[in-house]
Image (spheres, rainbow, N blue to C red):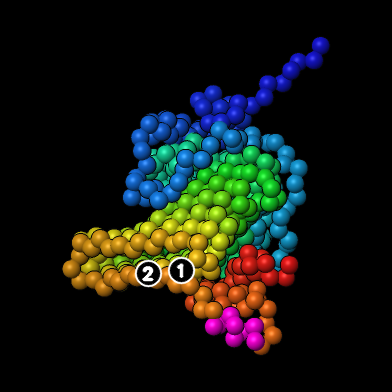
């Protein structure tokens, strides 16, 4: 007699959560954190989301029970999406919430650098990440999405760089979905101790344009005094994936964070992005490139918070919209009373390639100090048809002319990226979006 194997419970109910816990092999502190997060998630389901952040994001068609977290240990049946490149000092690849591959140069490992799968590092080096994971950057109880993420976190990428260690070559992380209806709750945790330096390029991607997917993610970038981090994330899900993420950077005194965001894919994406400058002399540069087509909705809620004197933040987002797409950006610079001599700047520019696209750009300031320089701005405009005509008169196709105009519009942002490899990856993604080479 054959015994039937029970199918995993779908959705994110208490039963599904218990089955998810039973499938994990992890330290007790992480399981306890999950349980607290799930209780917070259930409680926050009955209360509304922050209307200032969410009132322009339409969630009525979102059905989370259509998606399912893949249990730990299940094979994805899919190879790596990334080709090996000598430029990377290490790489981590996740598919459907499962770590497929991780490597790090022996030289960096000998210096105490940790770079790999969150689940593995939590089991083997829990003392390094326990006090940082979902505490300082993205607390588990910020809203229902952070609680949901922390309860069902499938793993993710960890980078830990000890005091004074400088990593010259970039590191690479890939988060991918390959099965229809798969849900991924990956977490990226970067910890740079005092004086450490690193560059991390991270991509999210769908293996197939026809599969539906859900990603509820979190990113925590934690920099010690004098640390320097260059972090670039290219969001390139397919047009059937829902993407929600809370992302936070915290920078100690004289630290420097350069953060580049590329928003290319997803059916609907909403990113809550915060940068806190916690020590004197801390600085952050945030670069954003967004390209929306068809009926995509890409939404960003950004905040630059100055918690200490003599700090500097500079945020520049560039949006390109086509067809019936929509981009939403709500930005805020917050200056605490003790943050004298703050220098804060934020700007959003939008280029509309059709008369049916829409961009909502809303900058804001909250200043409680009296010796500051804070400015903001937002612009939106159509493509100059004379520029397109001029290019076409000289033998350039309309598609190539549009690419030249878009590339020129975005170049202010891409020129700010010091790592050529990151610029190259971003430009190729934009070419694909425009259909160049098809």
Image-based side of 306 in relation to 171, left or right: left
- Looking at the figure, which quarter contains the C terminus? bottom right
Against 338, is 139 above or below? above
Read off the residue under disc 1: 350
Is residue 344 inside the magenta stretch? no
Q: Residue furthest right?
A: 1
Residue contact at pointers 2 and 1, CB within 8 angstroms: yes
Residue 40 lies in what quarter of the image? top left
Front residue of this view, candidates 17 and 407:
407
Is residue 154 shown to the viewer in this render?
A: yes
Residue 402 x, y percent position in the rendering: 60, 75
Residue 195 visible, this orientation:
no
Q: What segment is highlighted magenta in the picture?
A: 386-393
Question: On the picture, is 381 further left or further right than 181?
Answer: left
Q: Which of 12 and 327 lies nearest the eye of the viewer?
A: 327
Q: Measuring 65% from the left and 73% from the top, which residue is drawn there? A: 399
When asked about the image quadrant of residue 211, the answer is top right
Q: Of 287 and 84, which appears nearest the observer?
A: 287
- What secondary structure is found at the residue carrying circle 1? strand
| Residue at numbered disc 2 | 378
Looking at the rendering, which quadrant does residue 203 occupy? bottom right
């Amino acid at each position: 007699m054959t015994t039937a194997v029970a199918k995993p419970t779908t959705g994110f109910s208490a039963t599904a959560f218990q089955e998810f816990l039973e499938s994990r092999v992890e330290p007790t502190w992480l399981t306890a954190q999950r349980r607290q997060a799930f209780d917070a998630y259930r409680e926050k389901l009955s209360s509304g989301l922050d209307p200032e952040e969410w009132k322009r994001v339409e969630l009525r068609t979102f059905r989370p029970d259509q998606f399912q977290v893949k249990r730990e240990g299940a094979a994805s049946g899919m190879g790596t999406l990334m080709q090996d490149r000598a430029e990377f000092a290490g790489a981590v690849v996740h598919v459907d919430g499962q770590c497929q591959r991780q490597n790090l140069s022996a030289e960096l490992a000998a210096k105490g650098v940790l770079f790999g799968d969150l689940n593995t590092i939590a089991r083997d080096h829990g003392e390094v990440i326990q006090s940082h994971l979902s505490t300082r950057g993205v607390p588990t109880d910020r809203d229902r999405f952070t609680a949901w993420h922390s309860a069902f976190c499938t793993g993710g990428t960890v980078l830990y760089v000890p005091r004074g260690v400088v990593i010259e070559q970039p590191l690479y992380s890939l988060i991918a979905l390959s099965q229809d209806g798969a849900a991924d709750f990956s977490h990226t945790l970067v910890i740079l101790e005092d004086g450490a330096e690193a560059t991390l390029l991270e991509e999210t991607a769908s293996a197939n344009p026809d599969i539906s997917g859900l990603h509820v993610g979190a990113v925590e970038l934690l920099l010690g005094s004098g640390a320097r981090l260059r972090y670039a994330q290219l969001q390139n899900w397919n047009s059937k994936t829902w993407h929600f993420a809370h992302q936070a950077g915290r920078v100690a005194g004289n630290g420097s964070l350069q953060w580049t965001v590329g928003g290319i894919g997803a059916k609907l994406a909403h990113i809550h992005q915060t940068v806190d400058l916690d020590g004197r002399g801390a600085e952050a540069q945030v670069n954003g490139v967004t390209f929306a087509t068809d009926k995509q909705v890409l939404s960003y809620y950004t905040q630059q918070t100055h918690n200490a004197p003599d700090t500097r933040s500079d945020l520049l987002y560039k949006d390109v919209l086509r067809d019936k797409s929509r981009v939403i950006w709500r930005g805020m610079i917050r200056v605490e009373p003790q943050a004298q001599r703050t220098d804060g700047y934020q700007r959003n520019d939008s280029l509309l390639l059709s008369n049916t696209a829409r961009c909502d750009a809303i900058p804001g300031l909250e200043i409680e100090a009296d010796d500051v320089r804070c400015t903001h701005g937002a612009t939106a405009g159509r493509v100059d048809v004379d520029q397109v005509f001029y290019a076409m008169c000289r033998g350039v196709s309309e598609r190539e002319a549009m690419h030249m105009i878009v590339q020129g519009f975005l170049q202010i942002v891409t020129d700010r990226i010091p790592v050529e490899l990151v610029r190259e990856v971003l430009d190729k993604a934009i070419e694909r979006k425009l259909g160049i080479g098809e």
